[in-house]
Image (spheres, grey):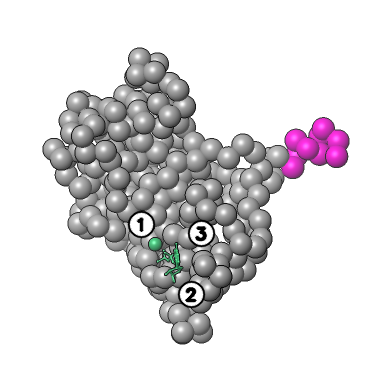
């Protein structure tokens, strides 16, 4: 490959590819089989499917927290990622600052050297001024914001989110949906978002990957048609309703065909 070819490949290559990935637990439970997925730089992709279809398993494989039984996961560059789980998983006896500092501390960055990045990450999620608070003093939505700040403090290229807002009330969830889109626009990161909500997946994503169970894999892929910047108006638009119907139909078809 010439240098020019290599440069071109780097521009056009997907950020990350899952190639026919399988994950079998204990030699018995086939959580995923033939799972393929290609992620382009800067896009927002949702994994949508019923409970037990392997969404979390797929996310954990992408995160490198577990290894595929078969198939390959290919990054086009250095893998850098942040993960947000459904539970905010904050350390209760540490203040907000220490919780967000953690990924940097694990890399040997001192409190002083980390300070700017930690405060910036907190500002990004709308929590400036809360650095001295303890998790117990925060609402569920605010804890989730701290968890997002912690995932972003290292400036990862890829943000992985596993049903992060499922436990929150609808109003808080809508606000966090808006804020995640704003954050992605500001940082230009790629996002893989796991959800079982059709409405949430359509509001957030450029592409929705519909998954089916037994074995878990992607059975259809839908490009969401939406304005460049999504707002409260989009949520109540005819276009949004139409996209939700498309995705909902695909999900129903997937569940019927693979019941
Ligand atoms: P989802 O996130 O879509 O609800 P999961 O990825 O959690 O689904 O699970 C997919 C399947 O794999 C389920 O049948 C689940 O019981 C099984 N599974 C997940 N993790 C493990 C594990 N560590 N050991 C055994 N089985 C597992
Ligand atoms: Mg899950």
* Disc 2 target residue: 213
As helix, strand or loop, the secondary structure at mark 2 comes to: loop
Residue at 36%, 50% (x, y): give it.
Answer: 85
Quadrant position of ligand 1 = bottom left
Where does residue 139 sit, x and y in percent of width and height? Answer: 16, 44
Residue lying farthest to the front in this orientation: 26
Q: Say which quarter of the image contains residue 135.
A: top left
As helix, strand or loop, the secondary structure at mark 1 comes to: loop
Q: Nearer the viewer, mark 1 or mark 3?
A: 3
Magenta span: 1-9
Residue at 65%, 49% (x, y): give it.
Answer: 74
Marks 3 and 2, how far apart at CA: 12 Å
**Does ligand 2 reach within 8 Å of label 1's beta carbon?**
yes
In the image shown, does 38 or 26 lie closer to the viewer?
26
Where does residue 187 sit, x and y in percent of width and height? Answer: 45, 35
Q: Is residue 233 left or right of residue 21?
A: left
* Disc 1 target residue: 163
**Does ligand 1 reach within 8 Å of label 3's beta carbon?**
yes
**Does ligand 1 reach within 8 Å of label 2's beta carbon?**
yes
Quick check: marks 1 and 2 in contact, CB under 8 Å?
no
* Disc 3 target residue: 58
């Amino acid at each position: 490959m010439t240098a020019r070819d290599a440069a071109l490949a780097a521009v056009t290559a997907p950020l990350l590819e899952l190639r026919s990935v399988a994950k079998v637990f204990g030699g018995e439970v086939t959580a995923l089989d033939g799972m393929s997925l290609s992620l382009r730089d800067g896009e927002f992709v949702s994994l949508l499917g019923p409970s037990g279809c392997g969404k979390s398993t797929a996310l954990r494989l992408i995160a490198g927290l577990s290894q595929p039984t078969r198939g390959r996961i290919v990054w086009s560059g250095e893998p850098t990622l942040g993960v947000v789980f459904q539970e905010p998983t904050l350390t209760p006896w540490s203040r907000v600052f220490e919780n967000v500092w953690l990924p940097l501390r694990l890399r040997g960055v001192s409190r002083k050297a980390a300070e700017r990045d930690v405060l910036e990450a907190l500002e990004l999620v709308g929590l400036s001024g809360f650095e001295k608070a303890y998790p117990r003093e925060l609402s569920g939505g605010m804890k989730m914001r701290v968890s997002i700040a912690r995932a972003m403090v290292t400036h990862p290229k890829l943000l992985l989110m596993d049903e992060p807002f499922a436990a929150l009330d609808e109003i808080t969830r809508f606000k966090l949906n808006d804020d995640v889109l704003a954050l992605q626009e500001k940082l230009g990161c790629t996002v893989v978002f796991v959800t079982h909500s059709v409405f949430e997946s359509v509001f957030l994503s450029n592409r929705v990957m519909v998954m089916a169970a037994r074995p878990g894999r992607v059975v259809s892929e839908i490009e969401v048609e939406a304005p460049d910047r999504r707002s409260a108006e989009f949520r109540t638009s005819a276009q949004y309703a139409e996209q939700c119907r498309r995705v909902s139909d695909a999900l129903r078809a997937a569940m019927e065909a693979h019941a």
